[in-house]
Image (tube, rainbow, N blue to C red):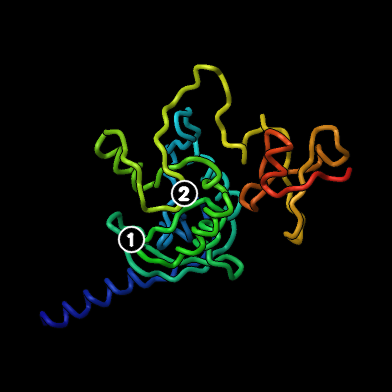
Amino acid sequence: MFRTLIFATAIVAATVVTAEPNGVIRVIDGDTFDIDGTRVRLHAIDAPETDQMCGDAASPAWACGEWVRAQTRALYEGRTARCTALDTDQYGRTVAKCAVDGRDVGERLVSDGLAFAYRQYGLDYDLAEKGAAVNGRGLHATGVMSPAAFRSAQRAQARPEPSRATGAKTVTVTKGSPSGKSWLPNVINPNCRIKGNISQGGREKIYHVPGQEYYDKTRISPTKGERRFCSEAEARAAGWRKARN
């Protein structure tokens, strides 16, 4: 009887871990979804906490955690995911790899610079993060500490030490802006008015300046590698050419 009870308990535990959450996504933050009533923590990625601030050295911070959540919602809210459960974490969440329209969600978020490879739990997205860092996509376009370092600092209620766990620039920033200047990174800063747009085929990087024919119609999508520039010289140095119209 005792052996039967142990065997039955093991089956139940295995079922909990291996249940496949498939269904409509509700985004909680950059690495956590609710899928078909199951709280899912995406495997081997780490996104900024919702209240996390990022920025450049000696500059006031900007709300990168809220920005990442908004970008993730724009990508996945209401879409259907198919997931493979791998584990259950200490908070009772199902750790899983998920795909939307056949593409790995974790890979997309890391590649777009919205999350980091969480190497402590796997090297699945190591190359995706390196590519994002080299090309300055998403969070890699500005100073950012790793989410793990941010959480550690919150727990210790102390000034965080720079993390070496990510390819992104890691800095310490302070809130506030005595000069009233906007400290959003260029990639999302509306005060940097030159718009860097990438053609549909992804082959051409073109920038538009105020007054040009298609300037007002041009929309910037940082998750696609598009960005803003504060000067034409900056745009040209980054490898973009001016629009002809």
Count of numbered marks? 2
Q: Nearer the viewer, residue 133 or 218?
A: 133
Q: Which mark is residue 153?
A: none
Percent across and percent down for residue 132 are 54, 55
- At horizontal 57% and vertical 47% (from top left) the residue drawn is 71
Label 2, residues with CA under 10 Å away: few <14, some 14-19, many ≥20: many
Mark 1: which amino acid? Answer: Gln
In front here: 166 or 231? Answer: 231
* Residue lying at 80% horizontally and 33% vertically, measured from the top left: 210
| Residue on which disc 1 sits | 120
Residue at 47% over, 27% down: 60
Give residue 83's position: percent from left, percent from top.
Answer: 47, 68
Q: Is residue 89 left or right of residue 71?
A: left
- For disc 1, the neighbor class at 10 Å (few under 14, some 14 to 19, many from 20) is few
Where, by quadrant of the figure, is residue 6 drawn?
bottom left
Question: What quarter of the picture does the N terminus occupy?
Answer: bottom left
Q: Look at mark 2 in the image and give the residue it sits on.
A: 168
Residue at the left extreme?
Answer: 2
Left or right: 4, with 152 as reference point: left
Q: Earlier in the sequence, mark 2 or mark 1?
A: 1
| Relative vertical location of residue 197 with respect to residue 21 in this rendering, above or below | above
Identity, as a three-letter code, of the amino acid under mark 2? Ala
Q: Is residue 156 above or below residue 10?
A: above
Q: CA distance from mark 2 to mark 1?
A: 16 Å
